[in-house]
Amino acid sequence: MSEWYRADLHIHTVLSACAELTMGPRDIVAAAEEKQLDIIAITDHNSVANTPAVIRAAIGHDLLVIPGVEVATAEDVHMVCLFPDQPQAQSFQEFIYRHLLEGDYDDSLYGPQIICDEEENILHQERKLLAFSTTAPMAQVYEQVVLHQGIAYPAHVDRRAYSALHILGRIPDEIPFPAVEISHRLYVDEARRRFPQLARYQILTASDAHDLKDIGKAITFFYLEEPSFAELAMAFRGEKNRKLTVSRPDVAIQNIPY
């Protein structure tokens, strides 16, 4: 029987240099439970290296963790990319790593990029240039995500930084995105009014959390038979009565921001 599930599909860990050092796997899982989330996605910049730790930290908890990544494309546009499992995510990461800029990362300038285990022990400090745009264009990133059975869509399109609408002036029609993400700062109706091109897309929102207090600050409701990637994918496609909304489904008032 289908029901509504609460999801925050854009969360960073300590692997993202811009994230707070509190964003370890156990604390992320605890914060997600405190916010009564059913599904989260881990989406560090240009790497999936910390997703296994969060998935393991969630074992025994009533929380689905989706492996993902926030890719910075050659156009300097951010895309959220979600995958059905860690092997597919890891294979996609190999593609992204081939398109990273060359050089040695200076954490004294940008902050540490920490890979950890589920107990939040530091395993490694990444020296790859994860915090910068890759050389992979949006169309190629989308193609690779689909090849890896994933879902990809433009991130925080209403923002000025790293947004397709502000950098390109449009969302590329030639890329068949199933949805777009808006930030917690904007109502859906206002987003559609300000950006008429969004009329053709499903719209979701997420916290883009870099700090524990922000987890669950913006959520999307998914109507699913169970919390799984396969069900999420059907909701993105609008198949078999699966659906998504940023409005609480149990009240009449629409477009309530979270």
Image (tube, rainbow, N blue to C red):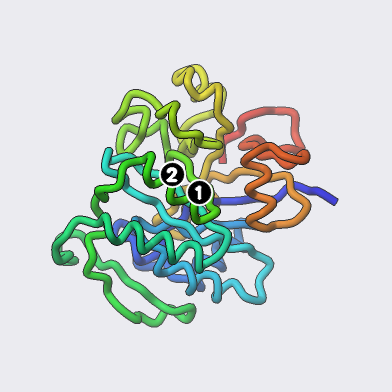
Q: Which mark is residue 142?
A: 2
Residue 30 as seen in the image, left or right of residue 153? right
Crowd tier of the residue under label 1, counting other residues whose Cα lies within 10 Å: few below 14, some 14–19, many 20 or above: some
Q: Residue 93 location, x and y as percent? A: 38, 62
Q: Nearer the viewer, residue 90 or 124?
A: 90
Q: Residue 175 location, x and y as percent? A: 45, 34
Which residue is the site of mark 1? 146
Q: Residue 142 location, x and y as percent? A: 43, 44
Residue 28 as seen in the image, left or right of residue 172? right
The residue at the far right in this view is 1
Residue 146 as seen in the image, left or right of residue 13? right
Residue 141 as seen in the image, left or right of residue 187? left
Q: Residue at x 50, y 63 (%)?
A: 88
Q: Amino acid at mark 2?
A: Tyr
Find numbered disc 1 in the image and state the secondary structure of the residue it sits on.
helix
Q: Which mark is residue 222?
A: none
Q: Residue at x 66, y 44 (%)?
A: 221
Q: Residue at x 22, y 60 (%)?
A: 129
Q: Residue 201 location, x and y as percent? A: 55, 29
Total labels: the figure holds: 2
Find numbered disc 2 in the image and state the secondary structure of the residue it sits on.
helix
The answer to whether 69 is drawn above or below residue 169 in the figure is below
Q: Residue at x 49, y 72 (%)?
A: 52
Crowd tier of the residue under label 2, counting other residues whose Cα lies within 10 Å: few below 14, some 14–19, many 20 or above: many
Tell me where residue 203 sits by quadrant.
top right
Tell me where residue 94 sits by quadrant.
bottom left
Residues marked 2 and 1 touching at CB (< 8 Å): yes
Distance between the alpha carbons at the discs numbered 2 and 1: 6 Å
Q: Amino acid at mark 1?
A: Val
Quadrant of the image for the C terminus? top right
Q: Nearer the viewer, residue 46 or 185?
A: 46
